[in-house]
Image (spheres, rainbow, N blue to C red):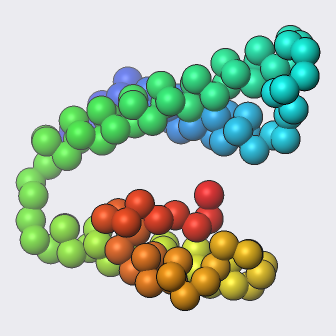
Amino acid sequence: MERKTNLEVLRIISMVMIIAHHYALHSGFDFLSNITINQVIVHILTLFGKVGVALFILISGYFYDKSNFTVKKFISLILKVWIYSALGIILGIIVNDNRINPISIIRSIMPVITRTLLVC
């Protein structure tokens, strides 16, 4: 498959938008007080994240549609998801995250199905 530079750039932009969303979401701003310019900027950054996720999914779907699906690729994807999930659990245990418990560990075995992500 030939490289599509414009889509690669758009994917990078969407990743930056997602990072801005996470920065704004975990910034610790108090949204209950009077509205300030900082709060408006943070709200705009959170909207960027939602647009970024939608763009990233659309671009990934485009590339997925253009690629050949094989069982080997699917198994590779599942193994990668499990590895990152296990790394998230290990990282959570190392930093003594209070969200780590036996139920969360069991749910993290299939993070896509259970919508479990502990490193977020």
Residues 20 and 69: in front is 20
Q: Is residue 25 depicted above or below 39 in this figure?
A: below
Which residue is outermost to the front? 32
Residue 103, given in percent of the width and then of the height, sits at 50, 82
Residue 106, given in percent of the width and then of the height, sits at 44, 84
Q: Residue at x 9, y 54 (%)?
A: 68
Q: Residue at x 38, y 24 (%)?
A: 6
Total residue callouts? 0
Q: Residue at x 52, y 77 (%)?
A: 104
Res 91 visible: no
Q: Determine whether, in the image, residue 101 is placed left or right of residue 71.
A: right
Quadrant containing the C terminus in the rendered view:
bottom right
Quadrant containing the N terminus in the rendered view:
top left
Q: Determine whether, in the image, residue 72 is placed left or right of residue 115.
A: left
Res 59 visible: yes
Q: Residue at x 58, y 67 (%)?
A: 118
Q: Determine whether, in the image, residue 69 is placed left or right of residue 28.
A: left
Q: Determine whether, in the image, residue 10 is placed left or right of residue 1.
A: right
Residue 73, given in percent of the width and then of the height, sits at 19, 67
Residues 11 and 79: in front is 79
Q: Is residue 83 depicted above or below 13 in this figure?
A: below
Which residue is outermost to the bottom? 102
Residue 25, given in percent of the width and then of the height, sits at 70, 39
Q: Is residue 63 depicted above or below 6 in this figure?
A: below
